[in-house]
Structures are given as C-alpha cells and as structure tokens.
Image (spheres, rainbow, N blue to C red):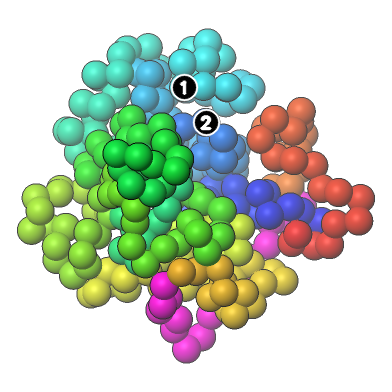
C-alpha cells in the first residue's frame, strides 16, 4: 500500500509511544502519532496539552492546543501552569518537539536564523519546549530532514538536548532524560549512549544511508548494520486516512503517481 513520507513519520513516532504513559504533545504530526498509538497498541496513553487539557480523547484533529475539540471527554481541564507542573513533578514520560535546527547532540533552535539581534528569520521561540526538553523522561523530535536543519552548530540554542555530549546534561542539572529519537522523512535517528552524539537507527524504505548523510550537516554516527524502518501497515494507513485525518489537514494525500515511500 502506498504511503507518504509524512505518514511514515507519523507511524514511526506512534511506535515510540508505550501504553499507560503520559505524553506531552502538540498539534500536527505529534497529535496524529499520539492518536494512532491510542487506537492501536497504547489505549492507556494519557495525552497532555500545554493549554492544561489532560487525558484528551481522540475526537477529531485540533487546530491548536486550546481547541475545544480536546475538551470532549477529557479527564481534566486545568491550566498551562498545571500542565507544566506535571513536567516539574517528573510525571511526564515523553514529550514531542519540533525544530528549525537540530545539532549533533539533539539541541534545538526554534528562536532565530542568523544573528540573534538582526536575524534573517525570527522564529516563534521556546514556548513550553524548554520545559519539556529539560524535564520529560524522554523527548521525541519530529523534523523534516534537510541539510540546513541539521547543522554542526546552531544559530541559537533554544532548547537543550545533550548540550556538549557525554555527561554535560547531567552536570547542567537537567533532570529529564533528553532526546531519545529524532524522526524525519528519511530516517529514524537516536543517540549513542556514551558520547550522546546522534546516530542512525534505521532508514525509511527507498532511502539509502548516503541519502541521509547528504542531508545532514555534520558527521552522523552510522553503525555497521542499519535496518530499514518497518513500513506502515495497511491498517495503520487506513486509520490515518479514514479516522484520524480524513480531511488531510496535516497529512497530504498521496499523489496519483507517487511511489512507495515518497
């Protein structure tokens, strides 16, 4: 069954979620991934939104974290402060983040491209991302795989990953576990346990290791054996297209001539 790159990203992210976890998510692909996990292998997943909506039930895609759709049958409607307090209390198992730039140690820039005082592009900034990255037990980063988005050095460090690598995160006093996965439209990336440097975990069908290297602006660690990302199943694709995002609000439908994995 044909699928798009966005669909394999959503499926790969969903598979990183575990039943009965507490997940701090946003809109877009993180929401789609969380809904898919809830409908498949993780029915006990608790969805937390920064607006303070706790235990949201998948009943239509929201356009923002404060969308009234998220209130339907939720466990609790609280506040931004309460949602962030769950992070501070160490109760959040996993958080999703996006990025304009990601460096070799999973540090994120979402503030500015170019000089901070006179940037080429001014970006939205941290929001709650710094809290999530600092305090969640693990973090999943979802980002398109382009060389400009994977520089050796960030223009601005908005959100901490493993800082300078090694035990620098621990020495900085950050209690969360840091990034566990970076999911892109080309591959799934992880972090080498000791150096904390980014490494290749799997390549999506139709993608080569060289394709991934060419779109990465730093030297990526590549183990001797790299598996292929398990493709989405027909059931997962049907859930995405028919139940989760039937209007194609976030997942663009495949083009008639699209090849598998494109």
Which residue is painted at 74% across and 33% down in the image? 248
Are discs 1 and 2 less than 8 Å apart at CB? yes
- Helix, strand or loop: magenta stretch: loop
Mark count: 2
Lateral position of residue 196 relative to residue 143, left or right: left
Q: Callout 1: helix, strand or loop? A: loop
Mark 1 or 2, nearer chain start: 2
Q: Position of residue 213 (x, y in %)?
A: 53, 75
Which residue is painted at 35% across and 18% down in the image? 52
Lateral position of residue 22 relative to residue 252, left or right: left
- Label 1: few (<14), some (14–19) or many (≥20) C-alpha neighbours in 10 Å: some
Q: Which residue is mark 1?
A: 65
Per the model, the C-alpha gap separating discs 1 and 2 is 7 Å
Q: Position of residue 102 (x, y in %)?
A: 40, 56
Start and end of the magenta stretch? Answer: 218-234
Quadrant location of the N terminus in the rendered image: bottom right
């Amino acid at each position: 069954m044909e699928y798009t790159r966005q669909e394999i990203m959503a499926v790969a992210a969903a598979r990183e979620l575990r039943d009965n976890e507490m997940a701090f998510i946003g809109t877009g692909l993180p929401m789609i991934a969380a809904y898919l996990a809830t409908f498949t292998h993780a029915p006990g997943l608790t969805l937390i939104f920064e607006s303070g909506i706790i235990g949201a039930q998948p009943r239509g895609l929201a356009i923002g974290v404060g969308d009234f759709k998220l209130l339907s049958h939720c466990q609790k409607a609280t506040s931004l402060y309460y949602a962030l307090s769950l992070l501070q209390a160490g109760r959040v198992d996993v958080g999703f983040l996006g990025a304009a730039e990601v460096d070799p140690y999973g540090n994120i820039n979402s503030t500015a491209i170019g000089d901070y005082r006179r940037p080429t592009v001014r970006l939205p900034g941290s929001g709650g991302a710094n809290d999530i990255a600092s305090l969640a037990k693990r973090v999943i980063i979802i980002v398109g795989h382009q060389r400009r988005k994977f520089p050796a050095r960030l223009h601005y460090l908005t959100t901490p990953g493993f800082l300078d690598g090694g035990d620098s995160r621990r020495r900085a006093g950050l209690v969360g576990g840091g990034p566990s996965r970076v999911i892109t439209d080309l591959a799934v990336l992880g972090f080498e346990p000791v150096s904390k440097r980014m490494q290749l975990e799997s390549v999506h069908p139709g993608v080569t290791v060289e394709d991934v290297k060419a779109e990465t602006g730093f030297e990526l660690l590549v183990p001797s054996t790299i598996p292929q990302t398990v493709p989405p199943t027909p059931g997962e694709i049907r859930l995405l297209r028919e139940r989760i995002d039937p209007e194609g609000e976030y997942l663009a439908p495949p083009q008639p001539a699209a090849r598998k994995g494109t």
